[in-house]
Image (spheres, rainbow, N blue to C red):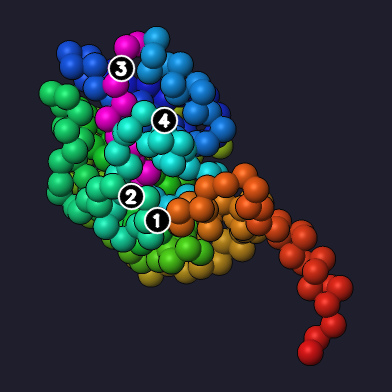
Amino acid sequence: MLFRELNRGKCKTYLIACEESHRAVLVDPIREKVDRYLAFLSYHTLKLEAVIDTHTHADHRTAGFELKELTGAKVIMHRKAPAPHVDLHVEDGESIPIGLAQLQVIYTPGHTPDSISLYTGGRVCTGDNLLIRGTGRCDFAGGDPGEQFDSITRKLFVLPDETLVFPAHDYRGNSHSTIGEERRLNPRITGRTRGEYVDLMNNLGLPLPDKIQEVLQPNQSALDDDRLRFPSLAELNQVRQLTPDP
Ligand SMILES: [Fe+2]
């Protein structure tokens, strides 16, 4: 099996491919890097079978629309994903074939209600729930810290200790971790009760992602047109200041 992270940035996209059959999937591809993904697939003579978004992203535009249009790949997300362009909705415990290999879907809500993790060959892609020494925020887009605690402790921490963890984001230059390390050393989870975790996550006080208006609406809908431009938070605030209260 070929397993590669393709973005080399804070936002991660994983290519998983069966080398015998030359079939591949991309997990969480971002719109700005479509050319790079197509070049990689072409160079390695891989056929893109599917694009899987681990959840509805609020910080970047998904490449699912473009890659589906350009390659005919299926777009796969959890049943609760709101986007109408999804070809296949999956549930907990389902398997997604990649040539001779299988990707197992683990439903891990919390960061969003449509969050899934994907397990194959001793590796798990954890989306934005379990990060390396951290966890993804769950204070918008239907997030729920209690569900997130349950997903991490009951669905992910029960995997073998040596399972390699590949999150959708990392802000400290890490490439991967293991389930055993995160169970012992994750500062958000280790030693906390569910209630303590919920309190912590409800009081992080993080600002909203910069491009949330531009990103969330197209990712949740069929709209995918550069001519459609959504105002930034700063622009919305400016409009509010200029508009007198009724
Ligand atoms: Fe996210």
Q: Amino acid at mark 3?
A: Leu
Q: How many marks?
A: 4
Secondary structure at badge 4 equals helix
User: Residue 124: x and y, percent?
Assistant: 28, 36
Query: Label 3: which residue?
Result: 46
Tell me the CA gap for discs 1 and 3: 27 Å
Q: Which mark is residue 178?
A: none
Decide which of tag 1 and tag 3 comes sooner along the chain. 3
Q: Badge 2 is on which residue?
A: 86
Whether label 2 touches label 3, CB < 8 Å:
no
Q: Quadrant of the C terminus?
A: bottom right
Q: Nearer the viewer, mark 4 or mark 3?
A: 4
- The residue that label 1 is drawn on is 83
Distance between mark 2 and mark 1 Cα atoms: 6 Å
Q: Quadrant of residue 232?
A: bottom right
The residue segment tinted magenta is 44-54
Kind of residue at badge 4: Leu
First reached walking from the N terminus: tag 4 or tag 2: 4
Q: Nearer the viewer, residue 30 or 141?
A: 30
Residue 81, image x, y percentages: 35, 57
Q: Which residue is denoted by mark 4 in the rendering?
A: 70
Question: Which residue is pictured at 29% across the width and 39% down the height?
Answer: 74
First reached walking from the N terminus: tag 2 or tag 3: 3
Give the alpha-carbon distance from disc 4 to disc 2, as whole Å: 15 Å
Q: Amino acid at mark 2?
A: Val
Q: Residues within 10 Å of mark 2 (few under 14, many from 20)?
A: many
- What x and y, as percent, mark residue 149? 34, 59
